[in-house]
């Protein structure tokens, strides 16, 4: 189960681009809390505290308790906007949720025991991940951190579907389990004679180009001398 994250916040009195830029200059990140049949509330967060929460790797599928001036609000992060240049967070949307609410979240998929998969360990097969996240409907208090897929015994040519995976208790996939392919074990890539000939041709062309550049440089040195 995902750990509950905690963030402190202050009420945001001013809105608009100018006010948001001023907050960011002061090391704050503007945000909004909405939903649960209540009016939206503008807030701002400490940028460093927010980055620390983002670096946990499960920010988007954890319950986040936002402390707004001593009043704690139970939320889920619904969207984080990042600056295209600095890649720093510039705005966050939070959704209010009730204590026992059922929510829909995207949970990351992880894989274990590759060494126990004959198709990978023995035959050199490659794990091809098709689905990196699975959307689940689950109680907010039981959101899993990850969905673990055990590769033990998997052979080349195997396909792993969502229906093959045991979901956490009380969790249901939003998509049809039989329709979702999570991963496949594909055969190792082997070079054909044509591939090898093409590689040799490219290497020869690169060698000739390098030699020509060297001759040009030597000619320029002699002319300058």
Image (tube, rainbow, N blue to C red):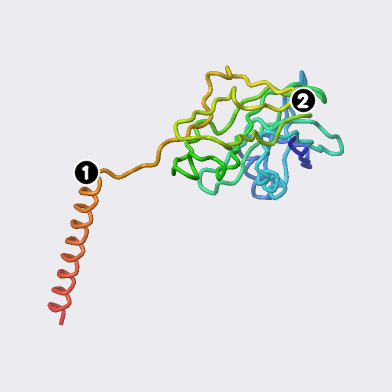
Report which quarter residue 195 is drawn in: top left
On the picture, is 217 further left or further right than 36? left
Whole-percent x, y for residue 125 in the image: 44, 40
Q: In this view, does 177 lie above or below 128?
A: above
Report which quarter residue 143 is drawn in: top right
On the picture, is 115 further left or further right than 197? right
Q: Work out whether residue 199 or residue 108 is closer to the camera in this orientation and state it.
A: 199
Of the residues tagged 1 and 2, which is closer to the observer? 1
Q: Work out whether residue 198 or residue 104 is closer to the camera in this orientation and state it.
A: 198
Q: Judging from the image, what secondary structure is the residue with disc 1 in? A: helix
Q: Where's the N terminus, which quadrant?
A: top right
Q: Work out whether residue 38 or residue 102 is closer to the camera in this orientation and state it.
A: 102
Q: Which of marks 1 and 2 is nearer the N terminus?
A: 2
Give the tally of numbered discs: 2
Residue for point 69% across, 48% down:
52
Q: Where's the C terminus, which quadrant?
A: bottom left
Q: In this view, does 211 lie above or below 146?
A: below
Tag of residue 97: 2
Tag of residue 63: none
Tag of residue 194: 1
Residue for point 60% across, 28% down:
134
Q: Judging from the image, what secondary structure is the residue with disc 2 in? A: loop
Report which quarter residue 163 is drawn in: top right
Q: Work out whether residue 43 or residue 155 is closer to the camera in this orientation and state it.
A: 155
Whole-percent x, y for residue 184 in the image: 48, 32
Whole-percent x, y for residue 60 in the image: 66, 35
Q: Distance between the residues labelled 1 and 2?
A: 59 Å
On the picture, is 145 further left or further right than 127? right
Whole-percent x, y for residue 51 in the image: 67, 47
- Crowding at mark 2 (Cα within 10 Å: few <14, some 14-19, many 20+): many
């Amino acid at each position: 189960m995902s750990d509950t994250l905690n963030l402190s916040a202050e009420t945001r009195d001013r809105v608009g681009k100018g006010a948001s830029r001023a907050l960011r200059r002061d090391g704050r990140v503007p945000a909004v809390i909405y939903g649960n049949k209540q009016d939206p509330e503008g807030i701002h967060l400490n940028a460093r505290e927010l980055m620390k929460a983002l670096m946990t790797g499960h920010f988007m599928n954890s319950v986040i308790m936002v402390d707004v001036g001593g009043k704690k609000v139970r939320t889920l992060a619904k969207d984080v906007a990042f600056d295209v240049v600095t890649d720093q967070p510039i705005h966050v949307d939070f959704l209010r949720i009730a204590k026992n609410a059922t929510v829909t979240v995207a949970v990351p998929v992880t894989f274990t025991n590759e060494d126990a998969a004959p198709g990978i360990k023995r035959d050199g097969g490659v794990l091809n991940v098709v689905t990196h996240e699975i959307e689940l409907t689950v109680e907010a208090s039981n959101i899993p951190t990850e969905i673990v897929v055990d590769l033990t015994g998997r052979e080349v040519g195997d396909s792993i579907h969502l229906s093959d995976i045991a979901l956490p208790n009380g969790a249901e996939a939003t998509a049809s389990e039989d329709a979702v392919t999570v991963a496949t074990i594909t055969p190792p890539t082997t070079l054909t004679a044509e591939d090898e000939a093409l590689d040799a041709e490219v290497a020869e062309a690169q060698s000739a180009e390098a030699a020509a550049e060297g001759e040009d440089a030597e000619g320029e040195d002699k002319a300058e001398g």
